[in-house]
């Protein structure tokens, strides 16, 4: 289906002493303890927490009379569960008549986070706070996400932070408790995988299209057990925000983490951010960061190569992110899959999505367009969509939610007048949060509704029970909102 | 964590691939702040279909799930493991698992067993032809046995995880035995590294 991609499997890990990859260097620098027959004990430099995957971890600490070892390496935000309307500013009430939180169960969970952060001395950015936002947007924004760090969070999209050359991965609640108590994690050393993207992305093709093409190629399990390093000229040419989008979806290919080696783009992004080193420390940090990229003779357990030059805008047709194709293509016939499991999965996906084989994506109408999430909720994403919408109106049949990834992104967008572009086009301009990415706050699809979404998962019911999701880039999302059916800006 | 040594029970054949954790437990159910009661949300959307395999009376009381490849992909929610154990499952057998799900399972006493696709298919066939088929997952021997179906399949699990599961050990307690090494490591960290305070 995708001729832009070629692949070679390599078995290059020899017995001799080889150079090390970026991932291996970061790993080695964080091993607290290594013993035969045991996983390595890794030190964790930064632990990000949110309301959904942390309450049971704090309960575990209390039950065992344990403390948080390093509250100063821990930071919390309210993002998954909170509404994106009615956020009047700092101090917006969590309960009572003026509260935007109407679901008592959601309120209890947010209250638990506030109570836990207060009890254990953890900095929290609550709903309405200027520093609040999606956990994977605020880390880089604050300059806490830095090259060479180990970063974890009870959220699979922690892979996002790898864009700055940090080894960052998602963990479950038991591991959250372990990190809170010990600031370490026992981990088996992962395999390494290089995804090299040669050439240059053509105009109109975005980082989102690139990562969707990669996942379509290697499959949702293609990166399983591996840390992926994205390399090559097309990756080097990406902005930091573009790299964040690519690394964000590493988990959708099953990878443990995604990485881009730090370079001048990384350093320029970090310099001057609130938690970035400054003065003499900046020079020390730069020296350390410049030694991080993999050695020339380093080898990977697996290598995949793509040609960026022949990519076009991508869209998903099915119910996992690997079921994606060029917007100019057509919905596949399940019978065209040789593998019986893939054939069955495709048939099931088409039934759920209410699509017929051979349908052109441009003939698929949507009810809802969602622009936001930790994948595409940053300033460049909003600019890309606003560029398409400027001077245009969204189709009357479409509702479009524009949800900045953080309150700072929201403020920056407003300073540039992007909010005015969105509202003039007929879109809703919201406060920051995970919003419609995951269907656990008030922003949801109704059963049978269909969306074009800049988020990361098109699973059954992901955006609301019975909802149907097509993953797209911000530019495609905006063009789709205008036409009412899946479309690229070039179609307008 | 409840120790896992060997478990014998009946199984449910889930002939689907890429069963993501959003299917295992939809986000709507993640608002609880305790670890209990997630079984009611297990496969919540799919269970609305009367023909879904978990709704078939012949599989009631089964304790082993035999699923297609890439089971537990997607979200890191450990609630997916809690939902499976709360519902009564002790082990999941599949050709491949999402990494985070597999780790979460081993932290919460649910045994993830990786077997080749052909063996998984043979187990599913056996269970479908006789839902009373008993399967033994023997962690000590690292083998899955379905005697009536003539299946005896070894599986891999690293020694450390196996030991921890068989003893039902608390990971944090194990790590805290090395607290001096953690402290020494902390003293060696560069001073310019970021703090959140």
Image (cartoon, coloured by chain):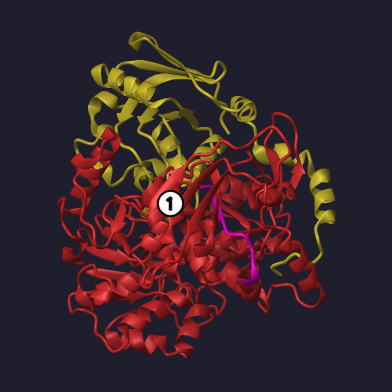
Chain colours: A red, B yellow
The vertical placement of B57 against B46, above or below, is above
Left or right: A72 as drawn, with respect to A411: right
Q: Residue A42: give x, y in percent of width and height.
A: 70, 46
Left or right: B126 as drawn, with respect to A367: right
Q: Which residue is mark 1?
A: A252
Q: Name which quarter of the figure residue B10 lies in.
A: top left
Q: Residue A144: give x, y in percent of width and height.
A: 65, 68
Which residue occupies 38% across, 21% down?
A: B119
Residue A261 falls within the magenta-colored stretch: yes
Q: Which residues are magenta?
A: A255-264
Q: Name which quarter of the figure residue A463 lies in.
A: bottom left
Which residue occupies 38% across, 65% down?
A: A103
Q: Residue B191: give x, y in percent of width and height.
A: 81, 64
Mark 1 residue element: helix
Which residue occupies 36% across, 9% down?
A: B150
Q: Residue A372: give x, y in percent of width and height.
A: 40, 70
Chief SS of the magenta region: loop
The vertical placement of A10 against A394, above or below, is above
């Amino acid at each position: 289906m995708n001729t832009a991609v070629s692949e070679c499997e390599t078995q290059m890990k020899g017995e001799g002493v080889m150079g090390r990859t970026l991932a291996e260097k970061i790993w080695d620098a964080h091993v607290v303890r290594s013993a035969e027959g045991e996983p390595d004990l890794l030190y964790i430099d930064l632990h990000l927490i949110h309301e959904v995957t942390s309450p049971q971890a704090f309960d575990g600490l209390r039950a065992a009379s344990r403390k948080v070892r390093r509250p100063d390496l821990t930071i919390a935000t309210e993002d998954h569960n909170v509404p994106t309307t009615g956020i009047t500013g700092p101090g917006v009430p969590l309960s009572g008549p003026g509260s935007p939180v109407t679901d008592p169960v959601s309120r209890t969970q947010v209250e638990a986070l506030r109570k836990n952060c207060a009890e254990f001395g953890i900095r929290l950015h609550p709903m309405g706070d200027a520093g609040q936002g999606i956990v994977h947007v605020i880390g880089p924004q604050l300059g806490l996400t830095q090259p060479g760090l180990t970063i974890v969070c009870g959220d699979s999209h922690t892979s996002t932070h790898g864009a700055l050359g940090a080894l960052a991965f998602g963990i479950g609640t038991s591991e959250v408790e372990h990190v809170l108590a010990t600031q370490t994690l026992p981990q088996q050393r992962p395999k390494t995988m290089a995804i090299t993207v040669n050439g240059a992305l053509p105009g109109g093709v975005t980082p989102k299209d690139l990562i969707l093409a990669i996942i379509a190629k290697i499959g949702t399990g293609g990166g399983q057990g591996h840390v992926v390093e994205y390399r090559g000229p097309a990756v080097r040419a990406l902005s930091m925000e573009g790299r964040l989008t690519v690394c964000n979806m590493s988990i959708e290919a099953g990878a443990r983490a995604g990485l881009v080696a730090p370079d001048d783009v990384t350093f320029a992004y970090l310099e001057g951010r609130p938690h970035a080193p400054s003065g003499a420390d900046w020079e020390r940090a730069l020296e350390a960061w410049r030694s991080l990229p993999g050695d020339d003779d380093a080898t990977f357990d697996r290598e995949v190569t793509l040609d960026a030059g022949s990519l076009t805008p991508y869209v998903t047709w099915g119910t996992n992110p690997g079921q994606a194709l060029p917007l100019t293509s057509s919905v596949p016939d399940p019978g065209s899959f040789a593998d019986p499991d893939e054939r069955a999965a495709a048939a099931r996906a088409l039934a759920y999505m209410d699509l017929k084989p051979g349908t052109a994506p441009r003939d698929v109408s949507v009810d809802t367009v969602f622009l936001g999430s930790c994948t595409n909720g940053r300033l460049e994403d909003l600019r890309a969509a606003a560029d398409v919408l400027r001077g245009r109106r969204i189709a009357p049949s479409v509702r479009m939610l524009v949800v900045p990834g953080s309150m700072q992104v929201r403020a920056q967008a407003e300073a540039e007048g992007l909010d005015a572009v969105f509202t003039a086009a007929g879109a809703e301009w919201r406060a920051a949060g995970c919003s419609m990415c995951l269907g656990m706050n008030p922003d949801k699809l109704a059963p049978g509704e269909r969306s074009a979404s800049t988020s990361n998962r098109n699973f059954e019911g992901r955006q609301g029970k019975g909802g149907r999701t097509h993953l797209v880039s911000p530019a495609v999302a905006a063009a789709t909102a205008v036409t009412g059916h899946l479309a690229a800006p070039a179609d307008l | 964590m409840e120790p896992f040594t060997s478990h014998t029970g009946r199984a449910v054949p889930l002939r689907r691939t890429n069963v993501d954790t959003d299917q295992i437990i939809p986000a709507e159910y993640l608002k609880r702040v305790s670890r209990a009661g997630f079984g009611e949300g297990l496969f919540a959307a799919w269970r609305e279909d009367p023909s879904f395999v978990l709704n078939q009376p012949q599989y009631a009381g089964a304790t082993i799930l035999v699923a297609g490849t890439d089971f537990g992909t997607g979200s890191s929610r450990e609630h997916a493991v809690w939902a499976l154990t709360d519902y009564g499952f002790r082990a999941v057998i599949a050709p491949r698992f999402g990494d985070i799900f597999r780790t979460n399972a081993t932290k919460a006493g649910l045994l993830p067993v990786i077997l080749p696709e052909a063996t998984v298919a043979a187990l599913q066939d056996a269970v479908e032809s006789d839902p009373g088929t008993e399967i033994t997952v023997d962690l000590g021997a690292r083998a899955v046995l379905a005697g009536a179906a003539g299946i005896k399949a070894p599986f891999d699990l690293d020694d450390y995880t196996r030991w921890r599961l068989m003893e039902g050990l608390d990971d944090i307690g194990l790590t805290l035995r090395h607290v001096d090494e953690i402290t020494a490591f902390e003293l060696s960290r560069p001073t310019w590294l970021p703090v959140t305070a």
